[in-house]
Amino acid sequence: MNALAHRQGRLLGCSLAGLVIATSGSVAHAEEGTFSTSMADLKRRVEEQSRQIESLNRDLAKQQMLLDDLQRTLDIASVRGRGTVPAGAAAAPSTPTTAQVTAAQPAQQVAQAPKPVGKPPERRTENRPPAVAPIFEQPGVLTPPGKWLVEPSLQYAHSSSNRIALVGYTIIPAILIGLIDVREVKSDTFIGALTVRRGITNRFELEAKIPYVYRTDTSVSRPVGAGAAADTSFDVDGHGLGDIELTGRYQLNDGGVEDPYYIASLRFKTRTGRDPFEVKVDRTIRGTTGTGLQTEMPTGSGFFTVQPGITVLLPSDPVVFFGGVSYQYSFARDNVKQKTNDGDLDLGKVQPGGAVGFNFGMGLALNDRSSFSIGYDHLSVGKVKVGGRRPTTSVRSQLGTLLLGYSYRLNSGKTLNLSIGAGLTDDAPDIQLTLRMPLTL
């Protein structure tokens, strides 16, 4: 860069020196040959030389400006290479300008202008909640208006429990006369479901879920007091259509980058599946001891249910916090009869207890293709009423589950979602796996 400036300075000096010599020669020639050269010709030649000097001065100023621009460009590139940018420094252009290319061609050395590295994240322009890896039943992102979303899913749940039943009486403390029944029950449930969502407006969507359920239970027991020589195993299963669900969701506010989103929902569950009262129960017959278990597993709950709820999502870059509350109400049934191997048992009016649920968690986008979520879901189910009163065996159930979710976008553009749940209470399933793949139409 200094060599280029020095060379241009030498060219300007030579031009000025030539001009002075030419001017001096012209004056001297005019003095020697006054009769051969007129004063008008001399004046014309002096004016021409003056114009040449002004032109050289303008060229020199332009060259100096180009040298300053190139010097600033090289300084910024050098500082960026060290990872810092000085305050007040001009940003380097992404491509060289025409003037820079013109100035660089004589010197035959122009450094390539630095290019920005990476791409800034795109700013969301629509008032829609950010997407996270789903772990709860209620999704956070609504379907765009006019779009269909079809989501096939497969869920597996496993639970086990141990029970000791004492049937008898005591005449001395700690000594039982009668039957001691030790029982271990293991349950496995597979649910394949097809969920269809339709975006009605930018804030409202409808959903329908059609499940198919396969359940199997294995019970191993030994009536200790009866002197049984070996364990007794009782296997039972059941499969068929489950309870179809219909849900509507509405986004209450616009939300924003740092403002929460509120989404209200109302779910209605039918009783299309086989309910527990339609399957037979193995009970005591003529003094013999039955298992007290169902001879076939139901695929539905047996009650119509409505569940209002509200979900809150709070974006806080780089994570999204979310949570919600809900209440599940089941409508009572009259004239309910339980099928048994000894005939139907009249139960009268049956009213399931209300269920209060809440959940919370957070989602983190790992990169542009994958995200991770963690959360906790809790459901408290009240006592059931039979015939207008609560049986002594009816208790409140607490289902607490810790959930982890992963989401990955495939090369085809489809998203694969996997969630894993671990039961933290005795009533919750030991493990729960859910695989989803939403498809937008």
Image (cartoon, rainbow, N blue to C red):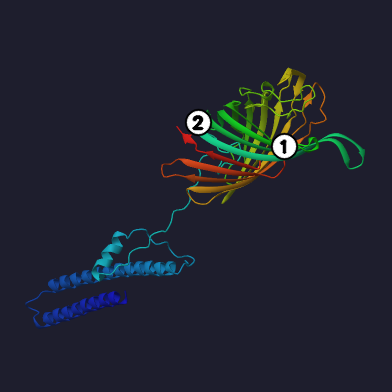
The residue carrying mark 2 is 145
Give residue 385's position: percent from left, percent from top: 78, 25
Residue at 73%, 40% (x, y): give it: 162
- From the viewer's perspective, tell me whether residue 162 is left or right of residue 2: right
> Disc 1 versus disc 2: distance between alpha carbons?
55 Å
The residue carrying mark 1 is 221
Residue at 58%, 34% (x, y): give it: 190
Q: Amino acid at mark 1?
A: Ser
Q: Secondary structure at mark 2?
A: loop
Residues 248 and 73: in front is 248
Q: Are marks 1 and 2 in contact (CB under 8 Å)?
A: no
Residues 316 and 143: in front is 143
In the rendered image, the residue lying farthest to the top is 335
**Callout in the foreground (1, 2):** 1
Give residue 60's position: percent from left, percent from top: 28, 71
Q: Quadrant of residue 11?
A: bottom left
Residue at 37%, 66% (x, y): give it: 73
Q: Amino acid at mark 2?
A: Pro
User: Is residue 127 at least partly visible in the picture?
Assistant: no
Give residue 348's position: percent from left, percent from top: 77, 18
